[in-house]
Image (tube, helix red, strand yellow):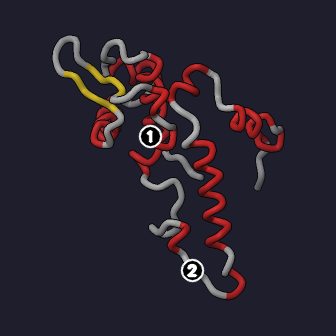
Amino acid sequence: MRIGAKTDYALRAALELAANDGERPVKAEAIATAQQIPPRFLEKILNDLRRAGIVESRRGVEGGHLLASPADEIAVADVIRAIDGPLANVSGKRPHELSYDGAAEKLPELLVAARAALRDVLDRTTLADVVSGQLPDHVTALAGDPAAWSKRG
């Protein structure tokens, strides 16, 4: 899985909003400063998140940005999909749409399994989980394996 800068910034911005608990709108400048995100880039990202229904914008002196739903109802995967689209794709196709012959015949099945593993972590972990530091047990177990932290290739 590759997470580009735009998605990284979107996740960090959403987490800043989640940490706010939806009590009052947060100015984009405050998010940009807190997470060291280029302000102009952040505005575009917040617009993408707004179009996806993850963020709401309020105008005026007391305006800013809020999560559109409670943080415990927004999965990390929702933010990723809002910016990048499906969690897994191969040349623009989803793994279950692939079909290969011969030695590569089982490759779609492997890629579907990889997508399922991503979903198991990213769809079942909410913004609230990350902000609270209380990741789901299965995520903590996976991250607790020293091999998960080792560099390969």
Q: Amino acid at mark 2?
A: Ser
User: Which residue is painted at 55% across and 67% down in the image?
Assistant: 95
Helix, strand or loop for disc 1? helix
Residue where numbered disc 2 is placed: 99
Front-most of 67 and 9?
67
- Pointer 2 or 1: first along the chain: 1
Find the residue positioned furthest to the left.
Answer: 60
In this view, 75 is above or below 65:
below
Residue where numbered disc 1 is placed: 79
Q: Amino acid at mark 1?
A: Val
Front-most of 141 and 26?
141
Q: Measured from the top left, where is residue 116 in percent x and y?
A: 62, 55
In this view, 152 is above or below 13:
below
Q: In the rendered view, does 14 fall on the left or right side of 60?
A: right
User: Which residue is painted at 77% across and 36% down in the image?
Assistant: 141
Q: In the rendered view, does 34 fall on the left or right side of 141?
A: left
User: Which residue is painted at 76% across and 56% down in the image?
Assistant: 153
* Distance between the alpha carbons at the discs numbered 2 and 1: 29 Å
